[in-house]
Image: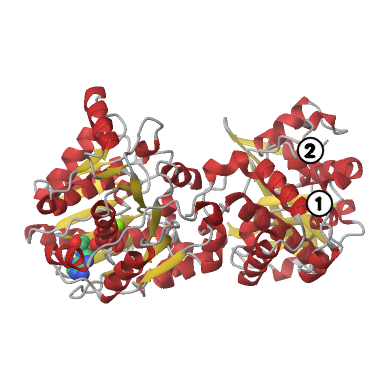
Amino acid sequence: MLSENLEAIRGVGKTRREQLNKLGVETVEDLLCYMPRTYHDLTDLRTVREMEAGTPWFGVLTVLTTPKVQYVKRNFSLIRVKAGDETGNVYLCWYNQPYMAQNLTEGESYYIYGKPEYYRGEIRLNSLMVEKLSEGEGARLLPVYRSTKGLSQGVFRKLLKNTFERYGDALTFPLPEDFTNKYRLLPLEDAYYGAHFPVDHTQKDESIRTISFFEVLLLKTFLARSKAMEEGKAVSLNLGQAAHDAFLAQLAFTPTGAQQRAMAAIRGGIQSTAPYEALLQGDVGSGKTVVAFYALYAAVLGGTQGALMAPTEILCRQHYESAKKFFEPFNIKVGMIVSGMRKKERDALLKQVETGEVQILIGTHAMIQKDVQFHELGLAVADEQHRFGVRQRAVLQQKGRAPHFIVMSATPIPRTLALIVYGDLDIIVMDELPGGRRPIRTHLVPTHKEEGLLGFITGQAELGNRIYYVCPLIEEGESEQVSVKAAYERLSHQLPNVKMAMLHGRMAQKDKEAVMEAFSTGDVQMLVSTTVIEVGIDVKTATVMVIDGADRFGLAQLHQLRGRVGRGDQQSYCFLLNRSKSEAPRLMDFCSTTDGFAIARMDLKNRGPGALLGQWQSGKGDLFFMNFAMDAHLLEDVLTAYDDIFIKNRYGEELQLRLIARAKNKYRSLLNEITLN
Ligand code: ADP
Ligand code: MG
């Protein structure tokens, strides 16, 4: 029933179905579970007098003129309609949406939502949403859906009403009464209805809480692997004291306290015959690589193989180069696998991996391909784990009987969320940077000071230092000035004495490598690049990071980029070029701290939890529970509930099986998409 095609719904024909498909809605169930993006509070209407430029406004306005489409240019149309209430008049504007003229009638009143702006002495409302007053009858909250051209909010609601009448009850998922009481849950079908058609805030909030709880419980059910079944399967890795000391002796530096604690935790954990799993969280530059090497070393000395997976090829090669050098004195053979290798070379490598001759394999996602077989994979590490999907990790894990597993990330993840996404795992926090580092100085550069910045860059280049110049785009789009190609063009003229090169993802791999190589030797002093350099790259003489169009990046990403400099003992700098005024406060916050954990919290505040749980954008739209991912209480509750059901077996096997079935059904297709951002 729920999996029925949309055309089974009254009022849905081919056109509607196609519109809904565009939103990722394929089935009846998808539609019923398609959650509002937000709600308009009909009890909190504003007047024209209360409008503030730049602040979203919601209220009731009467249309005062006949809506007409004006063609300003051949491809540019404008609708400008006067509307007002008893406190004043404004203009409603639509650009290139001629069909909107039919949706408005002179003399009628509408709910209007938009952002007021001053334009040539008048107040204009742009990016509007318009609703007939009748839509709000009897309701206090009006849900707003992410929609697509031709599918109005009113139509959306009508469709949902129809669909609920006929199919709503099928959403039910019976739960034991003491369970729903304990966790304060509504019947699921009521919760969905209440989220779409709430009478008040309380009903909306409780409905959303129930849905979130249920979704997270299903996710946890889906991702949880039975630890008990793997007990005794992992190889116990005992790193003796002499071997431990030999590792440390090989390092060019003394490990920080945090690194030592991390190594100790891992050394202890991997002695177990149940697979040890840990999330190693350490800010950019905290020195996670060494800890990864330590774990790989322990795997090899324990007679097994180690694997290290990196999210980009550049990072992978860098790890490979340093691992090869580092492990050489130990006589440990390191191999590398990336995509696009020559067949002969690849076959030879795979053979060595299979026989165990290659003891440490470093690779990109090419490592998880089917034909990569290990002799005995004892331990795997995923670097910058937030870049990998859950599936990739699962596949890598299946390459051994039950390898110990360490995931590393510079993005702090709340404990509860980690427990849900990764299952039961050890969380190791490295909260210390190697000594002698000077904090990077970060500045927001106003347009009139850009020339000064160019002078500074020249100065640094003369000192033999390297400069990164990062842009958000590769090529110029319509009105973009912040592309790699445009910046390169401009800067080559402005800085004739600085040797520069471009680097971006559309270049051939060997060109990218050549450029990186030239950058580390100094043949190239300045790299004009996209964010391909974002993760993990380590060039110690790089002292300047310029980020053009900084407003387009999230703070966590800016932090990653900034972490590319300040890796040696020289003072380093990060300059932000802001191209959008409204982003200034956020960027100022960023300039004020170098603490990655504080920055992650700011990001959460600014962008919401979506910043944290990234790419859920499969066709099905954002996972709704993301909005609650930061609700630690809810997550705790889910973990307890999961324990009650699956570990303590309080409610019997029938419920377990039903949950597993529903979870599989819901998440199977999403598995690829699950990554942490
Ligand atoms: P991240 O945690 O961001 O992956 P890396 O492992 O790339 O950090 O380390 C950053 C830099 O710091 C590297 O150049 C590394 O050699 C150096 N480093 C790591 N640990 C120490 C230490 N204890 N003392 C001095 N330098 C260190
Ligand atoms: Mg790293």
**Residue at the top extreme, as displayed:** 344
Type of the residue with mark 1: Phe
Type of the residue with mark 2: Val
Q: Residue at x 24, y 61 (%)?
A: 290
**Residue at the front extreme, as displayed:** 232
- Corner quadrant of residue 646: bottom right
Q: Position of residue 116 (x, y in %)?
A: 64, 60
- Corner quadrant of residue 257: bottom left
| Ligand 2 rendered quadrant | bottom left
Which numbered marker is on residue 28? Answer: 2
- Corner quadrant of residue 572: bottom left
From this view, report whether residue 79 is shown above or below residue 8.
Answer: below
Label 2: element kind: helix
Q: Is residue 197 left or right of residue 114?
A: right
Q: Position of residue 227 (x, y in %)?
A: 53, 56
Q: Position of residue 23 (x, y in %)?
A: 66, 39
Q: Residue at x 90, y 52 (%)?
A: 134
Name the one closer to the observer, 670 or 88. Answer: 670
Name the one closer to the observer, 233 or 390. Answer: 233
Name the one closer to the observer, 433 or 157. Answer: 433
Q: Position of residue 392 (x, y in %)?
A: 45, 43
From this view, report whether residue 404 is shown above or below residue 21.
Answer: below
The residue indicated by pointer 1 is 173
Circle 1 residues within 10 Å: few <14, some 14–19, many ≥20: some
Q: Dividing the image into 4 quarters, which one contains the N terminus?
A: top right
Q: Is residue 151 left or right of residue 443?
A: right
Label 1 or label 2, whichever lies nearer to me, is: 1
Name the one closer to the observer, 426 or 272. Answer: 272
Q: Residue at x 27, y 37 (%)?
A: 353
Label 1: element kind: loop
Tell whether circle 2 marks a residue whose Cβ is less than 8 angstroms from ligand 2. Answer: no
